[in-house]
Image (tube, helix red, strand yellow):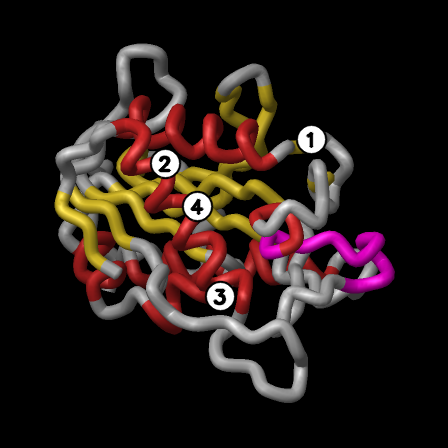
Amino acid sequence: MFRNTQGSSCRAPDDLVRILGSIYFSAHPVDSLLFQNPDLFHDLYVFKCVTTVIFTSGDRGIKGNFSLSLEHGLEEAYSWMAGLPMDVPSQKNSSVRINGYEIPSWSMRNMSNIQIIYLRIPDGGPAGQGYDANDGESLVKLYNGKLKSITTTDGNATYTLDELKDLLSAILNMRQANDIRVLDHKASISNTQDTISHNTDHVISAKLVMDAINRTKNGANITA
């Protein structure tokens, strides 16, 4: 049933991102649905201020509109969890400017408390091997120093490791969330596809967030 509400306003003074509430960091578009529920569902349903930062496009090396369809599916899921009727257009695509980068974002019409930020870093594959379509680039290669920089799948940004950490630190500082939710940053990863322990994008994205939290000395509650 559609709940007749305009949502709560959580905009920061510069109107870029929301303040207070929760911020979720996930490696792929689907991860917040699979690994961060039911907390995410609860936060959306009670109109908590929620920002989700998606690290990779989840493209699996597939060209075309595949990754955009994943983003659209995530947006539809967020709309449903927030109680909006499925036949009402909810998309409001735009971008946020952070550290000089124009980063794609999505929010819901008439509900300013919900926001998704897409970094669109290439999907690294389960073991971080990367895909030919993205020149084999992956987060784990960047994190381990095998790459000097990584370029987004839409070609709009290129990050060194320090620039990516600076970006995450800026998001945390601007967002000022009470609760930060990340994937398992302590999990082990494998260097071979035959003995995969955990998806490298999951682990490395979480490690990057923890590095940024340590930089900013953020006092929020952290859940992994």
What segment is highlighted magenta in the picture?
A: 131-140
Distance Cα–Cα, label 4 vs label 3: 19 Å
Label 1: which secondary element: loop
Distance Cα–Cα, label 2 vs label 3: 23 Å
Q: Residue at x 38, y 44 (%)?
A: 209
Distance Cα–Cα, label 4 vs label 1: 18 Å
- Which tag is nearer the camera, tag 4 or tag 3? 4
Residue matched to label 1: 157
Residue 211, image quadrant: top left
Number of marks drawn: 4
CB within 8 Å, label 4 to label 3: no
Dot 4 or dot 1, earlier in sequence = 1
Identify the amino acid type marked 2: Ala
Residue 30 badge:
3
Q: Position of residue 192 (x, y in %)?
A: 66, 78
Distance Cα–Cα, label 1 vs label 2: 19 Å
Identify the amino acid type marked 3: Val
Residue matched to label 2: 212
Left or right: where 80 falls relative to 221: right
CB within 8 Å, label 1 to label 2: no
* Label 2 CA crowd tier, 10 Å (few <14, some 14–19, many 20+): many
Residue matched to label 4: 208
